[in-house]
Amino acid sequence: MSAFLGPIHTWLYNKIKLQDELVNALIDAAVNANVAGDEIKAMLTRRYGELEKGDLEEICDPNNIHGWLQDRVSLVENRLAFAVTYLTMENSKNIEFLEKATYSFGEKRAVELSDAKSVYKFLEDNLLSGMPCDRVNEVIYESENLVSWQQVVDIHGIYWVNISGNITYYNKIKKSLINGLISQTELTFAEIDENQYEIRKK
């Protein structure tokens, strides 16, 4: 990444913010439904801190943009892993509640796109998958009606392993989010093999 603040940094920070918004939405939904008490908010803040508010150029460290952004990637990944793990710790069926809340979150931000290539680009522009240099996803096939890709690097698992969480819950949350985001399109999302996914025209 560039040593100077540029579009790629804003692009990444917007993805970080979206995941942070998702975590906050899941917590609010859980508290409102009495799945959890308000204490989870304080617990998350004590353990991991909070994402700063404001414009990127005003809050980032201009002398270490890459490191500052990496820290925020870790922050929101940790917050998601802990929130989901905490909310499912005593009742594994709560993951179904979280899937529905995640779908609703995505549905409110749904886009109307007509082809698979556009949807894949939209997902890449919005879903957090580490730093750009991590090169997490590799496209296998691409056309207007179908895009398939392989996740070649697992950058999410470590955050769940560190708290003895269930990484399959992350995959459920990701699937629900994607399905919500593309709910206004004529396309479907599926995992067709281990770490291999596709967006396909219905």
Image: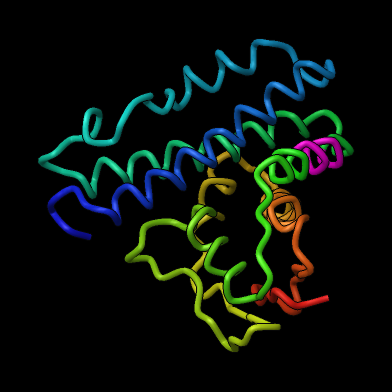
Inspect the magenta stretch and tell me whether residue 141 lies in it: no
In terms of secondary structure, what is the magenta stretch mainly? Answer: helix
Magenta part of the protein: which range?
Answer: 95-101
Residue that protrudes farthest toward the left in the picture: 63
Asked whether, in this view, residue 178 is left or right of residue 163, the answer is right
In the rendered image, residue 163, in percent from the top left (x then y), is placed at 58, 39
* Residue located 82% across and 21% down the image: 35
* Residue located 71% across and 48% down the image: 173
Q: Compared with residue 108, is residue 9 higher up or lower down, i.e. above or below?
A: below
Inspect the magenta stretch and tell me whether residue 97 lies in it: yes
In the rendered image, residue 51, in percent from the top left (x then y), is placed at 41, 28
Q: Compared with residue 54, is residue 78 higher up or lower down, i.e. above or below?
A: below
In the rendered image, residue 21, in percent from the top left (x then y), is placed at 56, 33
Q: Foreground residue, 47 or 129?
A: 129
In the picture, the quarter occupied by the N terminus is bottom left
Q: Compared with residue 52, is residue 70 higher up or lower down, i.e. above or below?
A: below
* Residue located 52% across and 64% down the image: 154
Asked whether, in this view, residue 130 is left or right of residue 43, the answer is left
